[in-house]
Image (cartoon, grey):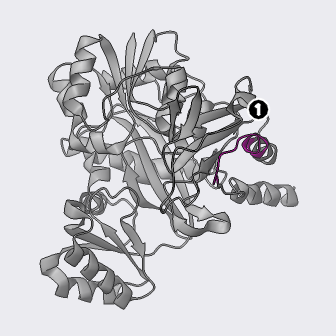
């Protein structure tokens, strides 16, 4: 069958790479794609936001399944549009994608269904008095979040109630987030370690994937500005088998059941961002798609036909609740443009990619790249996701493989974190000390 993947980043390259391994797949198209994706799929010059043009392409090219990578098209209702025209598509409907598209909806949903999360309140510009009273009552320092999608820039951790109130005033007055900032969610800051938990679901059955840990800050030691993600590793040992069962029972199952009971069944990939607190796992956020760069470590560990799984979900009939996983682990180091996540230059030639083309242990996923003649050059902030996949469960060895590969690639201004995956090593060291 012919497939269409929507998007242009590292997540989409990982999806194309994995889907191409299916014997069911004849041709993969990707809109708009990037230089790396173009080596495996046929690139289509349509923006991921142009749902009607994507629909027309799918109709004309006998696309049997469309897979949507980024969140914005899902929140905008691309799944609804394709279904209206009886085309199969993997992802949640507009109504279900509100779990990511509206933090106010997600918080209200969690409170309705008893899903553990931070104490929170939602406010508009006309509720400043109530907002101020709420902030002063919070038991911990406040976190300010704009309601809608903000490309990872709509969250501010504040040191005091005054700081939080000032941030809210600025958001409301400058309207810097547009419609996304018309409502603000304020919640208590949660202490703990973050983890990402993923499931595939047809709205009824759930099939969990490995847990992962992302590294959001730009610099080592979780310092510097927040980014879209500077690397990830999986499986994350902070999620033990016992904890995995607890997350499924207390968070995942109530979420899927709650969405179904409210008449908006969730189908596709659900990404639950967790804070592992002393009192147990609590939901920081929902995402309605695979994470990026988590997809670059999760997908290489899936030992199943991904095209078949996605097709079953798109048809509403997932045939398994257990997805076979390789031993792993997998470690992805993001190589970024100089200055990212602030201002950065593009058009820098990338050297060394050919040195890793034949590697069986390392996959280079492209994110912000394009072709200029025979050259591959940078075209975004996050440029490459260099992923090493282990086969013996040794995280330390897999981390080393990833960085050995990173050192073979270069471009002007490149920067990357040098501690990706290291927070996972402490669990193995503690286990060895006990034994």
| Residue 344 is inside the magenta segment | no
Secondary structure, mark 1, is loop
Q: Position of 174 compared to 390: left or right?
A: left
Q: Name the residue under label 1.
A: 391
Q: Which quarter shows the N terminus? A: top left
Instruction: Give the answer, above or below, for where 416 lies relative to 121.
Output: above
The picture quadrant where one finds residue 7 is: top left
Question: In the rendered structure, which segment of residues is drawn in magenta?
Answer: 402-414
Q: Residues within 10 Å of mark 1 (few under 14, many from 20)?
A: some
Q: Is residue 41 visible?
A: yes
Taking the spot 28% from the left edge, 40% from the top edge, the residue there is 74
| Residue 404 is inside the magenta segment | yes
Is residue 344 or residue 32 the one in the foreground?
344
Residue 303, percent from left and from top = 60, 25
Is residue 220 or residue 409 the one in the foreground?
409
**Secondary structure mostly seen in the magenta stretch:** loop
Taking the spot 67% from the left edge, 57% from the top edge, the residue there is 417
| Outermost residue toward the left in this view | 126
Is residue 374 or residue 219 the one in the foreground?
374
């Amino acid at each position: 069958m012919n497939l269409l993947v929507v998007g242009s980043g590292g997540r989409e390259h990982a999806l194309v790479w994995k889907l191409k391994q299916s014997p069911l797949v004849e041709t993969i198209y990707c809109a708009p794609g990037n230089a790396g994706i173009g080596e495996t799929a046929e690139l289509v010059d349509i923006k991921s936001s142009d749902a009607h043009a994507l629909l027309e392409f799918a109709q004309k090219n006998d696309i049997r399944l469309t897979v949507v990578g980024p969140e914005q098209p899902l929140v905008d209702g691309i799944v609804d549009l394709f279904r209206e025209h009886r085309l199969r598509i993997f992802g949640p409907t507009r109504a279900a994608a509100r779990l990511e598209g509206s933090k106010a909806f997600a918080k209200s949903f969690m409170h309705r269904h008893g899903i553990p999360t931070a104490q929170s309140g939602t406010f508009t510009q006309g509720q400043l008095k109530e907002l101020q009273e709420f902030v002063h009552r919070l038991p911990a320092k406040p976190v300010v979040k704009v309601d809608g999608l903000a490309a990872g820039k709509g969250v501010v951790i504040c040191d005091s109630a005054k700081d939080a109130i000032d941030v809210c005033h600025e958001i409301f007055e400058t309207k810097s987030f547009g419609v996304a900032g018309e409502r603000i969610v304020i919640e208590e800051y949660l202490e703990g370690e973050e983890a990402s938990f993923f499931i595939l679901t047809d709205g009824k059955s759930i099939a969990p994937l490995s847990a992962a840990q992302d590294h959001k800050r730009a610099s080592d030691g979780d310092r510097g500005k927040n980014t879209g993600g500077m690397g990830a590793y999986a499986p994350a040992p902070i999620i033990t088998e016992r904890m995995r069962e607890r997350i499924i029972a207390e968070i995942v199952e109530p979420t899927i059941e709650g969405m179904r009971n409210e008449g908006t069944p969730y189908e596709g990939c659900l990404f639950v961002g967790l804070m592992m607190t002393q009192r147990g796992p609590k939901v920081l956020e929902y995402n309605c798609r695979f994470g990026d760069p988590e997809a670059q470590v999760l997908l290489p560990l899936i030992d199943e036909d991904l095209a078949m799984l996605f097709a079953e979900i798109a048809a509403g009939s997932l045939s398994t609740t257990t997805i076979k996983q390789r031993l792993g682990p997998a470690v992805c180091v993001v190589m970024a443009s100089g200055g990212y996540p602030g201002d950065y230059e593009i058009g820098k030639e990338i050297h060394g990619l050919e040195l890793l083309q034949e590697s069986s242990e390392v996959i280079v996923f492209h994110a912000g790249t394009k072709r200029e003649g025979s050259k591959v050059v940078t075209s975004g902030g996050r440029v490459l996701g260099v992923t090493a996949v282990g086969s013996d469960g040794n995280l330390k060895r897999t981390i080393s493989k990833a960085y050995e590969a990173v050192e073979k690639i270069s471009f002007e201004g490149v920067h990357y974190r040098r501690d990706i995956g290291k927070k996972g090593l402490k669990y193995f060291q503690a286990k060895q000390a006990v034994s």
